[in-house]
Amino acid sequence: MTQEPLKLVLKCIDYEEYGNLYALNQEIPEEEMEKVKPYFKKYAPTDFKDIMNIEGNPYGWMCQKENIPQIEEILNITETLEKQEQKREEQQKILNQQRKEKDKAMDKIEEIYTGAPRPSKFLKKLLKKADIVYDPGDSYYTDHEYGEGQLFIIDKNYIWYIINNGRSDDDYTLNNIKTEGPGAVGFRVAYNEELHELIKIVSNENQYKGK
């Protein structure tokens, strides 16, 4: 197993006095630690003005952000805090873009299903007949017992959009899909590749793990 590169990571946040406090992500030889100890302090809960106003682990050797450049230079750290922050920003941009694409795709899906037929069916039979079933975020697999979750059930003829409707405050009279619980609302449209691709986007192609 490849060891993670040496770097400084956020360990504790003190909202009263010190701000962000950083620690090395792994132990280093004592002779190396001696070189950077002047920039660190070995903290304990008693070092904080208000222990109730901190996040993280208040124990151990930590440094403040202003000391990080010196520590990184002395220890020849290549995975600098600046690089880490740049990577996080880039990753957040990617996630934000993905979210926009998902929202746009979901808007199109909802438009397609507006006014779609809602035949009465048994969910078990639909699942058995399906070629593939998508479960966005495992929402149906993890939350169906609580009356929540959504599924997209695809076979060669139809694509079903199933919305679980079994919470205590839901209106069960809307349900046309019989489940092991109070039921679900199901919309059916003819299969088409464009809709299938939109569903892949909103679900990250995550398939249903249930039976």
Image (cartoon, rainbow, N blue to C red):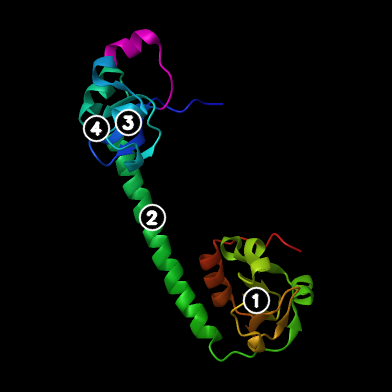
Mark positioned earlier in the residue sequence (2 or 3): 3
Q: CA distance from mark 4 to mark 1?
A: 50 Å
Secondary structure under tag 1 reads: loop
141 or 206, which lies in front? 141
Mark 2 or 3: in front is 3
Mark 2 or 4: in front is 4
Contact? badges 3 and 4 (CB < 8 Å): yes
Q: CA distance from mark 2 to mark 4?
A: 27 Å
Whether residue 26 sits left or right of residue 67 in the image: it is right
Mark positioned earlier in the residue sequence (1 or 2): 2
Contact? badges 1 and 2 (CB < 8 Å): no
Mark positioned earlier in the residue sequence (2 or 4): 4
Q: CA distance from mark 3 to mark 4?
A: 7 Å
Name the kind of residue labelled 4 in the image: Lys
Mark positioned earlier in the residue sequence (4 or 1): 4
**Quadrant of the snapshot with the N terminus:** top right
13 or 107, which lies in front? 13
Does 207 appear above or below 87?
Answer: below
Residue 167 horizontal/vertical position (percent): 62, 75
Secondary structure under tag 3 reads: strand
Secondary structure under tag 4 reads: helix
